[in-house]
Image: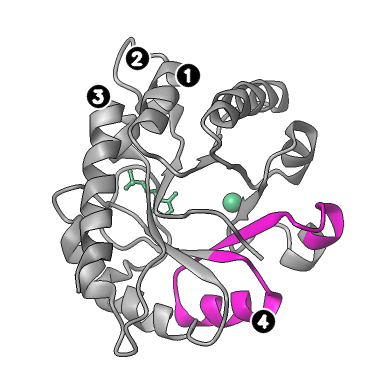
Protein backbone atom coordinates (compact mmCIF):
# COMPACT_ATOMS: atom_id res chain seq x y z
CA UNK A 1 0.00 0.00 0.00
CA UNK A 2 1.27 3.37 -0.97
CA UNK A 3 1.32 6.22 1.52
CA UNK A 4 3.09 8.58 -0.80
CA UNK A 5 1.66 12.00 -1.54
CA UNK A 6 1.82 12.06 -5.35
CA UNK A 7 0.39 15.54 -5.80
CA UNK A 8 3.57 17.24 -7.03
CA UNK A 9 5.87 14.59 -8.43
CA UNK A 10 9.24 15.88 -9.63
CA UNK A 11 11.17 13.83 -12.16
CA UNK A 12 14.77 15.00 -12.29
CA UNK A 13 16.52 16.06 -15.46
CA UNK A 14 20.01 17.40 -14.87
CA UNK A 15 20.56 18.23 -18.55
CA UNK A 16 17.72 20.75 -18.40
CA UNK A 17 19.15 22.91 -15.62
CA UNK A 18 19.66 26.58 -16.49
CA UNK A 19 23.32 27.48 -17.03
CA UNK A 20 25.19 27.71 -13.73
CA UNK A 21 22.29 26.36 -11.71
CA UNK A 22 23.49 23.66 -9.33
CA UNK A 23 21.42 20.46 -9.46
CA UNK A 24 21.33 19.91 -5.69
CA UNK A 25 20.47 23.55 -5.05
CA UNK A 26 17.67 23.32 -7.60
CA UNK A 27 16.39 20.10 -6.02
CA UNK A 28 16.34 21.65 -2.56
CA UNK A 29 14.56 24.76 -3.79
CA UNK A 30 11.92 22.63 -5.50
CA UNK A 31 11.34 20.76 -2.22
CA UNK A 32 10.93 24.09 -0.46
CA UNK A 33 8.34 24.94 -3.10
CA UNK A 34 6.23 21.91 -2.27
CA UNK A 35 7.44 18.93 -4.32
CA UNK A 36 5.99 15.84 -2.59
CA UNK A 37 7.90 12.99 -4.25
CA UNK A 38 11.05 12.84 -6.40
CA UNK A 39 12.04 10.38 -9.10
CA UNK A 40 15.75 10.31 -9.87
CA UNK A 41 15.95 9.88 -13.62
CA UNK A 42 19.48 9.56 -15.00
CA UNK A 43 19.49 8.44 -18.60
CA UNK A 44 23.13 9.18 -19.41
CA UNK A 45 24.97 8.60 -16.14
CA UNK A 46 27.33 5.70 -15.52
CA UNK A 47 26.53 3.60 -12.47
CA UNK A 48 28.95 5.34 -10.10
CA UNK A 49 27.61 8.75 -11.04
CA UNK A 50 24.00 7.58 -10.74
CA UNK A 51 24.79 6.23 -7.28
CA UNK A 52 26.37 9.49 -6.20
CA UNK A 53 23.47 11.59 -7.48
CA UNK A 54 20.91 9.26 -5.90
CA UNK A 55 22.71 9.17 -2.55
CA UNK A 56 23.09 12.93 -2.30
CA UNK A 57 19.55 13.54 -3.59
CA UNK A 58 18.18 11.17 -0.98
CA UNK A 59 20.04 13.00 1.79
CA UNK A 60 18.37 16.23 0.69
CA UNK A 61 14.91 14.67 0.25
CA UNK A 62 15.19 12.97 3.66
CA UNK A 63 15.58 16.38 5.28
CA UNK A 64 12.22 17.37 3.79
CA UNK A 65 10.64 13.99 4.51
CA UNK A 66 10.04 13.52 0.80
CA UNK A 67 10.35 9.99 -0.65
CA UNK A 68 12.56 9.23 -3.61
CA UNK A 69 12.04 6.71 -6.37
CA UNK A 70 14.70 5.53 -8.79
CA UNK A 71 14.08 5.33 -12.52
CA UNK A 72 14.81 1.87 -13.95
CA UNK A 73 17.67 0.78 -11.69
CA UNK A 74 16.63 -1.58 -8.94
CA UNK A 75 20.28 -1.98 -7.89
CA UNK A 76 20.63 1.76 -7.35
CA UNK A 77 17.32 1.84 -5.46
CA UNK A 78 18.50 -0.93 -3.13
CA UNK A 79 21.94 0.59 -2.68
CA UNK A 80 20.67 3.98 -1.58
CA UNK A 81 17.59 2.78 0.30
CA UNK A 82 15.12 4.51 -2.00
CA UNK A 83 11.40 4.15 -1.42
CA UNK A 84 10.85 2.47 -4.74
CA UNK A 85 11.42 2.20 -8.44
CA UNK A 86 9.77 3.58 -11.54
CA UNK A 87 9.96 1.54 -14.73
CA UNK A 88 8.84 1.78 -18.33
CA UNK A 89 7.11 -0.83 -20.45
CA UNK A 90 10.32 -2.44 -21.63
CA UNK A 91 12.16 -2.50 -18.30
CA UNK A 92 12.31 -5.17 -15.60
CA UNK A 93 8.98 -6.87 -14.88
CA UNK A 94 6.95 -5.87 -11.85
CA UNK A 95 7.08 -9.46 -10.56
CA UNK A 96 10.86 -9.47 -10.68
CA UNK A 97 11.03 -6.02 -9.07
CA UNK A 98 8.75 -7.20 -6.25
CA UNK A 99 10.98 -10.20 -5.64
CA UNK A 100 14.08 -8.02 -5.39
CA UNK A 101 12.78 -5.01 -3.46
CA UNK A 102 11.70 -4.81 0.19
CA UNK A 103 8.08 -5.72 0.84
CA UNK A 104 6.78 -2.20 1.21
CA UNK A 105 8.65 -0.73 -1.78
CA UNK A 106 6.74 1.45 -4.20
CA UNK A 107 6.60 0.34 -7.82
CA UNK A 108 5.38 2.64 -10.55
CA UNK A 109 5.02 2.02 -14.26
CA UNK A 110 4.70 4.35 -17.24
CA UNK A 111 1.51 3.72 -19.16
CA UNK A 112 0.59 5.14 -22.52
CA UNK A 113 -2.33 3.06 -23.75
CA UNK A 114 -5.19 1.22 -22.09
CA UNK A 115 -3.47 -2.17 -22.50
CA UNK A 116 -0.55 -0.83 -20.47
CA UNK A 117 -2.96 0.21 -17.72
CA UNK A 118 -4.74 -3.16 -17.70
CA UNK A 119 -1.40 -4.93 -17.42
CA UNK A 120 -0.23 -2.62 -14.62
CA UNK A 121 -3.42 -3.43 -12.67
CA UNK A 122 -2.86 -7.16 -13.17
CA UNK A 123 0.77 -6.79 -12.11
CA UNK A 124 -0.26 -5.02 -8.90
CA UNK A 125 1.72 -1.81 -9.24
CA UNK A 126 1.38 0.96 -6.67
CA UNK A 127 0.93 3.77 -9.14
CA UNK A 128 0.99 4.52 -12.85
CA UNK A 129 2.33 7.49 -14.78
CA UNK A 130 0.01 8.31 -17.68
CA UNK A 131 1.60 10.09 -20.62
CA UNK A 132 2.72 11.83 -22.47
CA UNK A 133 -0.33 14.04 -22.06
CA UNK A 134 1.02 17.02 -23.98
CA UNK A 135 3.98 17.46 -26.31
CA UNK A 136 7.35 17.61 -24.60
CA UNK A 137 10.96 18.35 -25.48
CA UNK A 138 12.21 16.41 -22.47
CA UNK A 139 11.76 12.89 -23.81
CA UNK A 140 11.81 11.47 -27.31
CA UNK A 141 8.33 10.03 -27.55
CA UNK A 142 7.72 6.66 -29.20
CA UNK A 143 4.00 6.49 -28.38
CA UNK A 144 1.12 8.77 -29.38
CA UNK A 145 0.16 11.65 -27.11
CA UNK A 146 -2.53 10.67 -24.62
CA UNK A 147 -4.31 14.03 -24.34
CA UNK A 148 -6.61 14.88 -21.45
CA UNK A 149 -9.45 12.71 -22.75
CA UNK A 150 -7.02 9.83 -22.88
CA UNK A 151 -5.97 10.43 -19.29
CA UNK A 152 -9.64 10.27 -18.30
CA UNK A 153 -10.26 6.93 -20.04
CA UNK A 154 -7.13 5.41 -18.51
CA UNK A 155 -8.07 6.68 -15.05
CA UNK A 156 -11.49 5.09 -15.41
CA UNK A 157 -9.82 1.68 -15.62
CA UNK A 158 -8.42 2.21 -12.12
CA UNK A 159 -11.86 2.51 -10.53
CA UNK A 160 -12.18 -0.05 -7.77
CA UNK A 161 -8.42 -0.44 -7.36
CA UNK A 162 -6.03 1.22 -4.91
CA UNK A 163 -3.66 2.17 -7.68
CA UNK A 164 -2.67 5.82 -7.78
CA UNK A 165 -2.13 7.83 -10.95
CA UNK A 166 -0.14 10.83 -12.06
CA UNK A 167 -0.14 12.48 -15.47
CA UNK A 168 3.14 13.40 -17.16
CA UNK A 169 4.34 15.16 -20.27
CA UNK A 170 4.32 18.84 -21.10
CA UNK A 171 2.53 19.86 -17.92
CA UNK A 172 3.01 23.56 -17.16
CA UNK A 173 1.35 25.98 -14.79
CA UNK A 174 -0.40 27.38 -17.87
CA UNK A 175 -2.14 24.10 -18.81
CA UNK A 176 -2.39 22.43 -15.40
CA UNK A 177 -5.96 23.34 -14.57
CA UNK A 178 -7.06 22.30 -18.06
CA UNK A 179 -5.20 19.03 -17.61
CA UNK A 180 -6.83 18.32 -14.27
CA UNK A 181 -10.36 19.24 -15.31
CA UNK A 182 -10.10 17.43 -18.63
CA UNK A 183 -8.87 14.25 -16.93
CA UNK A 184 -11.80 13.82 -14.56
CA UNK A 185 -13.85 10.68 -15.26
CA UNK A 186 -17.61 10.16 -15.27
CA UNK A 187 -17.15 8.50 -11.88
CA UNK A 188 -15.28 11.58 -10.62
CA UNK A 189 -11.99 9.72 -10.40
CA UNK A 190 -9.25 12.37 -10.34
CA UNK A 191 -5.52 12.30 -10.75
CA UNK A 192 -3.53 11.81 -7.56
CA UNK A 193 -0.86 14.10 -8.87
CA UNK A 194 1.09 15.53 -11.73
CA UNK A 195 4.64 14.68 -12.71
CA UNK A 196 6.86 17.35 -14.19
CA UNK A 197 10.42 17.76 -15.34
CA UNK A 198 11.14 20.96 -17.27
CA UNK A 199 8.57 23.23 -15.65
CA UNK A 200 10.56 22.94 -12.42
CA UNK A 201 14.05 21.81 -13.41
CA UNK A 202 14.56 24.29 -16.26
CA UNK A 203 13.42 27.16 -14.09
CA UNK A 204 15.79 29.71 -12.56
CA UNK A 205 13.35 29.75 -9.65
CA UNK A 206 12.35 26.13 -9.04
CA UNK A 207 10.87 27.03 -5.69
CA UNK A 208 8.42 29.48 -7.24
CA UNK A 209 7.71 27.07 -10.11
CA UNK A 210 6.83 24.30 -7.67
CA UNK A 211 4.78 26.64 -5.48
CA UNK A 212 2.75 27.72 -8.48
CA UNK A 213 1.99 24.14 -9.56
CA UNK A 214 1.23 23.08 -6.00
CA UNK A 215 -1.16 25.98 -5.49
CA UNK A 216 -3.06 25.18 -8.69
CA UNK A 217 -3.29 21.50 -7.78
CA UNK A 218 -4.57 22.32 -4.29
CA UNK A 219 -7.14 24.76 -5.65
CA UNK A 220 -8.41 22.06 -8.02
CA UNK A 221 -8.61 19.60 -5.12
CA UNK A 222 -10.55 22.10 -3.05
CA UNK A 223 -13.17 22.67 -5.76
CA UNK A 224 -16.62 21.50 -4.70
N1 LIG B 1 7.65 10.37 -19.70
C1 LIG B 1 6.65 10.75 -20.50
S1 LIG B 1 6.77 12.38 -20.93
C2 LIG B 1 8.18 12.57 -20.00
C3 LIG B 1 8.52 11.38 -19.40
C4 LIG B 1 9.68 11.14 -18.55
C5 LIG B 1 8.92 13.85 -19.90
C6 LIG B 1 8.13 14.92 -19.24
O1 LIG B 1 8.90 16.07 -19.14
P1 LIG B 1 8.29 17.53 -19.14
O2 LIG B 1 9.49 18.43 -19.20
O3 LIG B 1 7.54 17.71 -17.85
O4 LIG B 1 7.42 17.66 -20.36
MG1 LIG C 1 12.83 2.94 -18.42
Q: Are marks 1 and 2 in contact (CB under 8 Å)?
A: no
- The residue located at (31%, 35%) in the rendering is 200
Which residue carries the number 1 mark? 24
SS for callout 1 = helix
| N-term-proximal mark, 4 vs 2 | 2
Number of residues whose C-alpha sits closer than 10 Å to that of mark 1, classed few (under 14), some (14–19) or many (20 or more): some
Which residue carries the number 3 mark? 205
- The residue located at (21%, 73%) in the rendering is 182
Percent x, y for residue 33?
33, 33
On whether ligand 1 comes within 8 Å of the CB at mark 1, the answer is: no
| N-term-proximal mark, 1 vs 3 | 1
Q: Are marks 4 and 1 in contact (CB under 8 Å)?
A: no
On whether ligand 1 comes within 8 Å of the CB at mark 2, the answer is: no
| N-term-proximal mark, 4 vs 1 | 1
Q: Which of the two discs, 3 and 2, sits closer to the camera?
A: 3
Rendering quarter of residue 52: top right
Q: CA distance from mark 1 to mark 2?
A: 9 Å
| N-term-proximal mark, 4 vs 3 | 4
Which residue carries the number 4 mark? 122
Pick the quarter of the image with the N terminus: bottom right
User: Is 80 inside the magenta-drawn segment?
Assistant: no
Amino acid sequence: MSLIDYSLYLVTGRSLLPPEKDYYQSLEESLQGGVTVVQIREKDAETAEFLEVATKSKEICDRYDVPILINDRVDVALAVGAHGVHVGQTDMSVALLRSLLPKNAIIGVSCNNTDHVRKAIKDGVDYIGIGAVWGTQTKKLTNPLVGVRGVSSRLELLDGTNIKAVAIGGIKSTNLLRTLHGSVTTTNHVLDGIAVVSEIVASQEPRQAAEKLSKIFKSFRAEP
